[in-house]
Amino acid sequence: LSGVAGSNVSLGGNALTLGGTASGAFGGVIGGTGGLTVAGTGIQTLTGSNTYTGGTTIAAGGTLQLGNGGTSGSVVGNVVDNGALIVNQSANVTLANVLSGTGSLTQAGSGQLTLTGTSTLSGPTTVAAGTLAVDGSLGQSTVTVQNGATLTGTGTVGGLVVQSGAFAAVSQPGAA
């Protein structure tokens, strides 16, 4: 799927499946009551403020990236992540979504990603850049904080690995 800001896709109640090996970037808004499935091996990047409410599914081998280093890119509703979810934004963004599945979550942007939902994600979480604030729960997910990145928040994570040069707030379970 490719398109610039100002492009719109109206799902109505239908589902949109992105498959194949090609990567794509969509800067417009995906709306409607339908859902989005990322099933291919290409990286699908969303940089618009999406409003669809049917939830998001990332199949094994699929990658969904929210943002491309800028200040926007979002999904509404719960996310079943059995592939890879990457958040790459320079702005501060809050995801209240419930994250479930066996896939990975990566905070890659220079901004702060705040998670407030009660998630059951069991795959690994990586804070590669910026800050990850867990104010909800990341279920069984082990969080790795890489050099130069920060983990903070009042929520819970499944486990914690803090690499040299990284920071995890004392209030974060497993950080003390």
Image: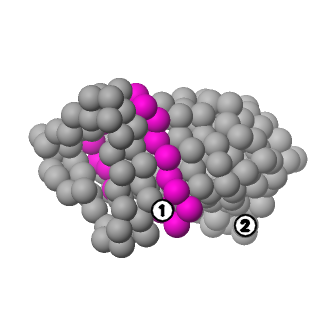
Instruction: Give the mark toward the camera: 1 or 2.
Output: 1
* Quadrant of the drawing holding the N terminus: bottom left
How far across and how far down the image is residue 131, in percent? 56, 48
The residue segment tinted magenta is 45-62
Answer whether residue 92 is visible to the viewer in this image: no
Q: Amino acid at mark 1?
A: Gly
Q: Amino acid at mark 2?
A: Gln
> Which residue sits at x=73%, y=51%?
122
Nearest the camera: 97 or 172? 97
> Which residue sits at x=22%, y=48%?
27
How far across and how far down the image is residue 115, in percent? 59, 36
Question: How far apart, in angstroms, are the residues tagged by discs 1 and 2?
Answer: 27 Å
Would you identify the image quadrant in which residue 36 lies? top left
How far across and how far down the image is residue 39, in percent? 44, 59
Q: Which residue is mark 2?
A: 163
In this rendering, position of residue 93 left or right of residue 171 = left
Label 2 secondary element: loop
Would you identify the image quadrant in which residue 43 lies? bottom left
